[in-house]
Every structure is written in C-alpha cells, then in structure tokens.
C-alpha cells in the first residue's frame, strides 16, 4: 500500500488543534501523519506561515498533503506557506481544503488512513458536515441531504449480481461517528469502493460505505435496519465482514449474547399488567412518565398538494397569506420558547432559523407580488419558497445549502395552514387523541406536540437522554423509546397502550389489559393530586419515621419554586450559579445578597450552602487552572477551593453572615480525605472569627460524599461533621468509572448498582444516630431508589423542586422495616436490574 496522504491542521489555537487531532486519531487509529501548525511562538493565538510550511514538509510522505484550516487568516497563512515551499512538486502535492476544521479532520483522517488519495480525502472532508446537516434537517424527510462537491449520490443497487443484506444497529447511540468510522475503515481495508449502505427503516438514500461523511447521513439509530449492498467477486466477503462487525456492535458494545452494556430495561417495581405483545425482545425504554391509550398514528406528514385553482380576490388572498404566516410564526415561537426553557439557547436556534425564513423579504415579497398578480395564496407561497429552496440547494457552501431543508419545512407548515390540510395531530377529529409512532423525533417536533392532542409517543429508536425525550418530559407527553422497528409496521389506527414510567407498551391490547391500564392511570392521577395537596406536610413513613424532603436549587428563583413546592429545606444550593459566566469572582457582599435571597425565599427554613464546586470540567475564566487530562479526577470541589484560599475565605464569610440570621448548613463538595475537611473547617473558623460575632447559632457543617474512599471511611469524618450528603451523581460515576456526561457509558452509571448502594449503606452505618445522612443526587427522585435509600437509613432526600411533592408521597408509602429488608437484599444483588426486580 502506498504511504497515506498526510494531514496538516492549521489553527489559531494550539489547544483546539491538539483536541481536534486527538478526536481524529480516536476515529482513525494508527500512525497517520497528522501535523499541527497552531498558535504563535509566544503561546498566543495566531497562525504562522513558516510553521505551516514546516508542518506540510513533515506530513508529506510522497502521497501529498491535505491542509485543514480554521478561521480567515489561517487560510492566508496557509496560502503564504505554499509560496514558501521551495520544491514545486511538493507544492503541487498540497491541497488546501475549505472543510470545517473538526468535522473535516475526522473524516479526512478516516479516509486517509483507509488509503484514499488526496483528492478523495479533500472531497470527503468537504462533505464532512453532511451527517450533521442530515440530522438537523431530519424533521423534513423529503428534503434532500447535501452532498460533498463532486460526490454524486450513488444509484440504488440494481445489478442482478449485487448482494444486499442487512443488519440491525444495536449500538445505544446508533451508527454515530465512532462505529461509522470503524465501518468505513473496514470497507476501505477490503477495497470495497462500490459498497453502499442505506437506512431501510427510514428509507434513506444510498450512501457510499467508504465515506464517513456520507455514512453518517443515513441517520441510523439503534434498532434501525441498515442494508449493505455490494457487487463483484468479493461482494459476499465484504458484506459478511460488515455484518460481522455490526454483530460485534462495531467493537463499541459487547456482542449480543455476551455480557452487554446495552441498557437493561428498567422494569417497574410491579407489573400488574403483563405485556401482551412486545415489539422487540427487551421491550421499550421508559422515557416520559404517564399512561397513554390511543390509536396508533404514524408521524409521517405527507407533503401538501397545492390546489390547482385560480386565485380569488387579491386582497382576500393577501389576507390569507399574512394570516397563515402569522399563525406559523406563533407556532414556531412557542416551540422556541419551550426549547429555550428546557434545552438552552443553542437548541432554540433551529427555531430562530425557521422564524427568519418567515420574515425573509425576498420570499415573502415574491409571494405577495404573485398574489397581487392574481395567483392564489398557496400557489404564490409554494412557488416563492420552492424557488428559494432551489437557490439554497445550488449553493456550494454546505452550511448555506442546508438552509434548503429549513425553507421546505417552513414552506410546508405555512401551506398546511393555508390549504387547511392539518397535520393529523392538529385535527384529532372526533376520536381519542392518537399515540404518535415514529422512528425518532426531532427536538422541533417534540416541542411542537400538544399534550391535549397527543396521548403519547412511541419511538422505534431514540434515547431517553436525547433532547427530544427531555422535551417530551417537559411537555408532559407520556413516551417510550427504543421500541424497535417492528412498531413502525403496525397498522395505523391499531390501539396502543403505554406506560412511560415503566417502559411498557401493549399493541392491540384486549379489553382487560386496557381496563387495567386505565385503572393504573386513574391511580396515578389520584396520587399526583394527593401529593400536591399534601406537599407542605411532613413526609413520615407508615411506621412513623420522619424523612426530610428538601430541594436542590441553583438560583434564588429556584428557591422560590422550592418553597412553593413544599420543600422542608434546601438540601443543596449549587453556589456555582454566582461564579460561572463572568469575568471575575463575586465579592463578599454580592454573595451575601444572593444567599440571603435564597434564605428569604425559604422563609426561615434551613438552607444548605455548598461551597464552590467547579474545576477542570467547569473552569472559571478568572482562575488560572491548568488543562487536565482527566478533569473529573483533578482539581475539583474542595481541592480547588483550598487551592484558592481567598476565594474560599470570601465565600465562607458571606455564608457566616447569612448564618447569623437564618439556619445555614455549610457543605463541602468532593471531599476525599479527612485532612481536606479539617483544612476547610479551619477556613470556616477563620471566617467566623473574621466576622467577629461568634459561631452563628444554627450553623451546621457537613460534607458531600461523592468519592468512594470517603464513603468507606465515613467513620473517620463523623467526629467532624453534623451531616453527610451523598451526591449519588458523582458517587456513581466514581464508583463505576463511568463519566456522568458520557452517553456511551450512561447505562453503566446506574445509581442502583449494588456497588453504589453498598457505599450508601457504609455511610449510613458509620453515621450512627448523631450524624444525619442525606442524599442530594438525582437518584433521590426515583421512587424505587428513594424507598431503598430510606431502607438503608437515609433521612433526608433533596430533589429538584417539581419532584418534592411526589417524593414526599413515596416516603409516606414506605414501611421502614420492610424497606430495610428490601435494601439489605439489594446490597447482595448482582446488578441494578436485580435490584429493581
Ligand atoms: C452529586 O454529585 O450527586 C451532586 C448532587 O452534585 P452535582 O450534581 O452538583 O455534582
Ligand atoms: Mg457532585
């Protein structure tokens, strides 16, 4: 094999370039020549033509070099670098590639390490955004996905000799970049230049299996069926090899039949209704709580057909057009507000793009002019938007070309309103609200669903942590995900019943099963009502054990919500809210005012102020922190606070001042050693002395137990604390070595793993009678976990404000002796699913 094409990364930032190269090397392991020319000599931001020329020389092993660059002047420097190359042949072997740096580098690396020549590597890189664009445009399945320049869409397999076989994607996150890179590398290794793939579940176009950029455009999620087509002498070998790789989960997950990190179905504590039919073994996953019963409705909106009729009176047509545009703008704004509230500004941007299109003078004026000339409003709008979409299609810049999908999506929405072809969900008719079934949902679609018109949602694919699932929860639409592709084939109108909390789905259930589901729904509604009515009453188990139910807050506004929700106290104030997103730390006065605002909202109930819990993973611009290879194992929590003693001293002083007027618990995060706690306590003593009014009367001190070592030696901390608060979010990640934000290991990081429960047990046993044990991690919200925690001896649960009433109700149903027995059994279970059973 000839030497691979070399890659050069030109960036203003050395850190950015290093991170991009690290990512690319992960996708394309091996010793591909990738050179970096980034930053300037004094360590600052910038690019340097001489350094770029040197990098090109080092990367060129004779097969040429593809150069990827970040912003504007990087391109100028790279062009200048070419002029600095003495050897004209070497210069001819260099291609400056306009691809986006990170995405381009990743696909270029996979192509280059698979032996692609430099033109092919550059073309791959240039199409690197296709996967992302396809995903963002997924709410408009009819819209074409842009393709890399000069990369023709391969025709559908037609030859007689062609072999077409298929596999089901088992990877939890679908055929995302890493498994797709494995697949492309394999096909390239086998010289499978004509091999093609398509997503048979969604009916995607065929994509060449040698192109990472194109393979990601087929949008294959877990449970989707992907077809592989190959022809020629080695076709069967190649197809077999691909299927074998797929069966191994693309080497990302364990093969079926072996111990697998696939999400274990979260079974309900009890199953009064057996699932009469499960669309796939393992059943669906719970995604959004609630019970839904309704006829199946496939979410595949048909394109609107514009009626072939002359326009009416121009003024009337004009009015129709303006009204339809205004209606759709309102719908989009609603979606944007929901997305911004639940997901943040970045996710809401897709809605902004759609809104801008409705306001695009080019399109709107053209439609208005056509109406004035006698066209009907639908015809005028359809023509104007089709022209705009075609113009976007033709643009060479993939970012801009992708706008065509946006134009078509918005065009259809307005046309539906104009022509009166409702989205079937806008017009439920006389029947009961349907259960929406789709392969997956975009966040935009999820945000637009009206819980009054949709009984529930079943997705063949999807992930409970995906944004669409978060939005379904936020909108209160019951949902199960990962039901498998067979659910898509169920006839429209077939009755479906689902329990979104238990992850149960019944297809065409009999009358008894429906009645049982209805009973379950009625019982849940009753429970919720009762929980709301009793939210301010204390939570006491059936046998008289009091358990405090507090709220976790991240701002004074959250504290107001916590008080309204009936919280007995604030069990965790994440004081980070005051320190992030600013250029300098807040001074003592500002902190005091913020903590006082939380205290005022709670009206004299205890507030637990956690000292600053930031670090390598959440850096503060005003703290000089070194980059860390493993930030979660680095300078976080109390370690960081004690490294910046003045910061800690100011924070403790503000807390002490507030503690003179209201009951305050000071809590130190991520404590691993007794020495850390003692150092922190000394700082607190100093703050008390600095304030000069003696120890505040209700002041309590505790630590968060988030590090397994702290849990195991809890007894050593007991003499120095009033309480332990177990942070199950971090304790779980450290116990199971599964980073909490990494979706690839999300199913491993289960707080109901007996390993985690044993640590909770160790803390409770060490704490004895004097020291209160609280749990303030997310696990406290899970009813089953809450019961076990109480059984283990936890006497305070702190959760997000909306969960307070429900958790109190759960506690009221616990019999502590029975819960203790169950908890003891859970400690010896083999894994979280056995614990749940
Ligand atoms: C935890 O780790 O469980 C916790 C409550 O702290 P945070 O989520 O803020 O890290
Ligand atoms: Mg934590």
Image: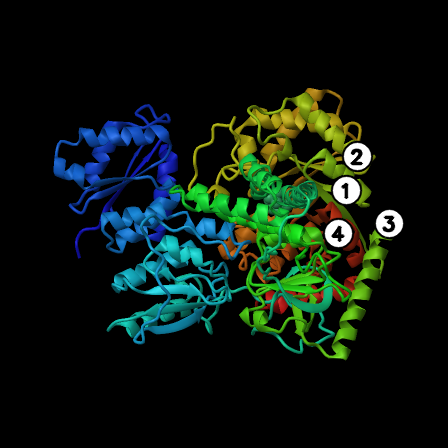
Residues at discs 1 and 2 in contact (Cβ within 8 Å): yes
Task: Provide the residue designation for mark 4.
Answer: 795
In the displayed structure image, the side of residue 408 where residue 798 appears, left or right: right
Task: Provide the residue designation for mark 3.
Answer: 537
Q: Earlier in the sequence, mark 4 or mark 2?
A: 2
Front residue of this view, candidates 268 and 668: 268
Q: Quadrant of residue 253?
A: bottom left
Q: Residue at x 38, y 48 (%)?
A: 128
The label nearer to you, 3 versus 4, is 3
SS of the residue under disc 3:
loop
Question: What colour-coding does the image apply?
Answer: rainbow
Relative to 667, say whether 829 is above or below. Answer: below
Task: Provide the residue designation for mark 2.
Answer: 601
Residues at discs 3 and 4 in contact (Cβ within 8 Å): no
Task: Provide the residue designation for mark 1.
Answer: 562
Q: Quadrant of residue 94?
A: top left
Front residue of this view, candidates 434 and 575: 434
Q: Earlier in the sequence, mark 1 or mark 2?
A: 1
Residue 350, position as x, y percentages in the image: 56, 43
C-alpha gap between disc 4 and disc 1 = 19 Å
Residues at discs 3 and 1 in contact (Cβ within 8 Å): no
């Amino acid at each position: 094999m000839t030497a691979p094409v070399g890659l050069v990364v030109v960036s203003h930032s050395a850190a950015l370039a290093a991170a991009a190269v690290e990512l690319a090397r992960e996708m394309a392991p091996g010793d591909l020549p990738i050179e970096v020319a980034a930053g300037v000599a004094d360590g600052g931001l910038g690019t340097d033509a001489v350094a770029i020329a040197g990098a090109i020389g080092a990367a060129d092993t004779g097969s040429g070099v593809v150069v990827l660059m970040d912003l504007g002047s990087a391109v100028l420097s790279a062009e200048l670098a070419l002029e600095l190359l003495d050897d004209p042949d070497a210069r001819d072997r260099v291609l400056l590639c306009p691809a986006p740096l990170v995405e381009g580098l990743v696909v270029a690396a996979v192509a280059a390490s698979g032996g692609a020549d430099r033109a092919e590597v550059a073309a791959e890189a240039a199409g690197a955004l296709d996967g992302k664009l396809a995903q963002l445009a997924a709410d408009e399945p009819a819209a074409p996905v842009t393709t890399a320049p000069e990369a023709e869409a391969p025709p559908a397999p037609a030859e007689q000799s062609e072999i077409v076989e298929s596999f089901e994607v088992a990877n939890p996150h679908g055929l995302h970049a890493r498994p797709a890179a494995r697949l492309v590398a394999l096909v390239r290794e086998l010289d499978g230049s004509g091999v093609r793939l398509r997503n048979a579940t969604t009916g995607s176009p065929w994509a060449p299996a040698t192109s990472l950029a194109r393979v990601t455009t087929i949008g294959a999620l877990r449970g989707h069926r992907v077809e592989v087509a190959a022809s020629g002498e080695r076709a069967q070998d190649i197809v077999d090899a691909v299927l074998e790789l797929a069966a191994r989960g693309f080497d990302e997950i364990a093969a079926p039949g072996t111990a697998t990190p696939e999400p274990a179905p979260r079974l309900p504590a009890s199953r009064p209704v057996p699932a009469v039919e499960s669309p796939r073994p393992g059943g669906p996953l719970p995604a959004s709580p609630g019970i839904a019963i309704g006829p199946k409705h496939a979410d595949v909106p048909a394109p609107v057909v514009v009626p072939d009729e002359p326009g009416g009176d121009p003024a009337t047509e004009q009015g129709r057009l303006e009204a339809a545009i205004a209606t759709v703008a309102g719908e989009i704004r609603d979606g944007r507000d929901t997305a911004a509230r639940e997901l943040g500004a970045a996710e809401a941007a897709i809605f902004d793009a759609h809104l801008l299109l409705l306001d695009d003078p080019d399109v709107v004026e053209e439609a208005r002019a056509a109406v004035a000339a006698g066209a009907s409003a639908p015809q005028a709008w359809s023509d104007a938007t089709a022209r705009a979409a075609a113009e976007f299609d033709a643009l060479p810049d993939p970012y801009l070309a992708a706008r065509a999908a946006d134009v078509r999506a918005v065009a259809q929405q307005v046309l539906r309103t104009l022509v009166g072809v409702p989205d079937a969900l806008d017009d439920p008719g006389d029947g009961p609200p349907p259960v929406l079934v789709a392969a997956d949902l975009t966040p935009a679609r999820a945000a637009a669903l009206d819980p009054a018109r949709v009984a529930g949602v079943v997705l063949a694919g999807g992930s409970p942590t995906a944004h669409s699932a978060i939005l379904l929860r936020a909108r209160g639409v019951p949902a199960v995900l990962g039901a498998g592709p067979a659910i898509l084939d169920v006839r429209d109108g077939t009755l479906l019943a689902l329990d979104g909390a238990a992850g149960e789905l019944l297809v065409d259930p009999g009358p008894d099963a429906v009645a049982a589901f209805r009973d379950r729904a009625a019982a849940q509604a009753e429970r919720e009502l009762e929980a709301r009515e009793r939210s301010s009453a204390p939570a006491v188990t059936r046998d008289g054990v009091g358990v405090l139910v507090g709220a976790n807050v991240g701002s004074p506004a959250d504290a107001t919500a916590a008080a309204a929700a009936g919280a007995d106290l604030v069990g965790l104030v994440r004081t980070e809210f005051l320190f992030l997103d600013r250029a300098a730390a807040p001074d003592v006065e500002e902190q005091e005012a913020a903590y006082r605002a939380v205290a005022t909202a709670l009206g004299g109930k205890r507030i637990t102020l956690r000292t600053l819990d930031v670090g390598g993973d959440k850096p503060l611009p005003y703290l000089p922190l070194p980059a860390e290879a493993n930030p979660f194992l680095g300078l976080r929590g109390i370690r960081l606070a004690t490294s910046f003693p003045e910061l800690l001293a100011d924070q403790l002083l503000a807390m002490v001042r507030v503690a003179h007027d209201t009951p305050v618990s000071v809590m130190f995060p991520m404590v691993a050693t007794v020495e850390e706690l003692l150092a922190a306590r000394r700082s607190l003593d100093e703050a008390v002395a600095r304030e000069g009014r003696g120890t505040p009367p209700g002041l309590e001190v505790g630590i968060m137990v988030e590090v397994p070592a702290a849990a195991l030696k809890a007894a050593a901390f007991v003499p120095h604390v009033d309480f332990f608060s177990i942070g199950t979010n971090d304790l779980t990640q450290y116990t199971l070595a599964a980073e909490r934000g990494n979706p690839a290991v999300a199913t491993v990081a289960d707080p109901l793993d007996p390993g985690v429960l044993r640590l909770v047990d160790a803390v409770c046993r060490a704490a004895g009678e004097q020291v209160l044990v609280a749990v303030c991690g997310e696990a406290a919200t899970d009813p089953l976990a809450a019961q076990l925690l109480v059984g283990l001896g936890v006497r305070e649960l702190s959760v997000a404000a909306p969960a307070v009433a429900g958790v109190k109700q759960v506690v009221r149903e616990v019999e502590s002796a029975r819960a203790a027995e169950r908890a003891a059994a859970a400690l010896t279970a083999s894994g979280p699913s056995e614990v749940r059973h």
